[in-house]
Amino acid sequence: MAPHRVTLGDLADAAHAEPALRVRFTAPAGPIPLGFHLTEFKRNTVDSIDCGGVVNRWQEAAVELLGDTTGRAMVASTLSAILETTVNALPGIEALPLLIEYAPHDATVQRFEVALATVEGDELVVTLRDTHGECKANTRALSSGTACCAPGCCGQ
């Protein structure tokens, strides 16, 4: 079973509930410096065709997060206000699974899913997890009890 996908709305609710807390994002390699900058919010529509020839379409929300640019910690009330502006400008984005695109010091962008947002002491900690590839044809095959590379899969 796939893990729960946190939505932009879930993060907005957590930030709204604890407005005075500092916001900390924690990636699998460790905490992201507190002076991060939320530079862009995106509502992406993905159209794809998998190796089994099935066309897929989904939407996701993405936040571009730059490494320490301000030297100041963001508080949850600021995050809440930014997310409210985003939801008003891009209706429906609050219901979409949320990805964080993190570029430490303008380096290569890494993509993470949001695992959860929890209160830890005086911080709202947004825990990130690595994203993983998936063979959708294999996932369908496993759920139906057939082999991945049966006729019709992988162009066969």
Image: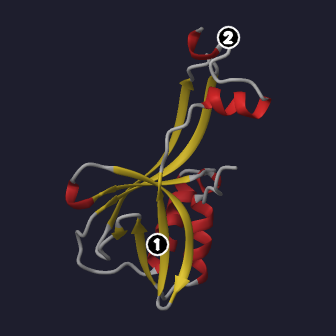
* Residue for point 61% across, 51% down: 96
* Residue for point 62% across, 72% down: 13
Question: Which circle marks residue 79 in the picture?
Answer: 1
Give the colour scheme shown.
secondary structure
Looking at this view, is 136 or 45 the one in front? 136
Q: Residues within 10 Å of mark 2 (few under 14, many from 20)?
A: few
Name the spot of residue 125 as percent of width and height, x first.
48, 77
Callout 2–callout 1 Cβ contact below 8 Å: no
143 to the left or right of 45? right
The correct choice, above or below, for 108 with respect to 67 in the image is above
The correct choice, above or below, for 116 with respect to 137 in the image is below
Looking at this view, is 155 or 107 the one in front? 155
Q: Residues within 10 Å of mark 1 (few under 14, many from 20)?
A: many
Looking at this view, is 131 or 99 the one in front? 131
Front of the two marks 2 and 1: 2
**Is label 1 in a helix, a strand or a loop?**
helix
Name the spot of residue 142 as percent of width and height, x first.
71, 32
142 to the left or right of 48? right
Question: Which circle marks residue 32 in the picture?
Answer: none
Question: Type of residue at label 2?
Answer: Pro
* Residue for point 57% across, 68% down: 116
Q: Quadrant of residue 30?
A: bottom left
Residue holding disc 2: 151
Quarter placement of the C terminus: top right
Question: Type of residue at label 1?
Answer: Leu
Residue at the extreme bottom of the image, as rendered? 121
The correct choice, above or below, for 25 with respect to 45 in the image is below
**Is label 2 in a helix, a strand or a loop?**
loop
Residue at the extreme right of the image, as rendered? 144
Name the spot of residue 92 as percent of width and height, x first.
63, 50
* Residue for point 55% across, 45% down: 60
Measure the alpha-carbon separation of dots 2 and 1: 49 Å
